[in-house]
Image (tube, rainbow, N blue to C red):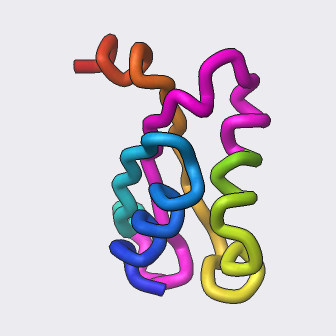
Amino acid sequence: MNHEEVARLIESELEDAEATVTQPRGVDDEDHLAATVVSPAFEGESLVSQHQLVYDALGEHMTTDIHALELKTYTPAEAADRV
């Protein structure tokens, strides 16, 4: 899967999600990805639960197409505070 496909899949499965997917710096393996995801679905969820929501959105791709995923998740308010 390419970066855009992964981002689209996350965005289609999570409420009002905005996903940015890139190749981690210094990693040449296309199966290793980094994603930053902002969604109101993360409100009130623990960090572990937020990450599980993203993994669930990616489904079987996490075991077949993606070897590793560096993940940062934020609620919209948290993302606004980072600007």
Residue visible at 49% across and 60% down? 12
Please, is residue 83 above or below residue 73 in the view?
above
48 drawn magenta: yes
Of residues 3 and 9, which is closer to you in this image? 9
Residue visible at 53% across and 73% down? 32
The answer to which image quadrant residue 23 occupies is bottom left
Report the number of numbered marks. 0
Range of residues picked out in magenta = 27-51
Please, is residue 10 above or below residue 47 in the view?
below
* Residue 37 rendering spot, x and y as whole percentages: 46, 44
Please, is residue 68 above or below residue 54 in the view?
below
4 drawn magenta: no
* Residue 14 rendering spot, x and y as whole percentages: 56, 48
Relative placement, left or right, of 33 versus 50 is: left
Residue visible at 65% across and 60% down? 57
The answer to which image quadrant residue 82 occupies is top left
Relative placement, left or right, of 73 versus 51 is: left
Relative placement, left or right, of 11 versus 52 is: left
Relative placement, left or right, of 81 versus 74 is: left
* Residue 34 rendering spot, x and y as whole percentages: 46, 59
Residue visible at 55% across and 54% down? 70
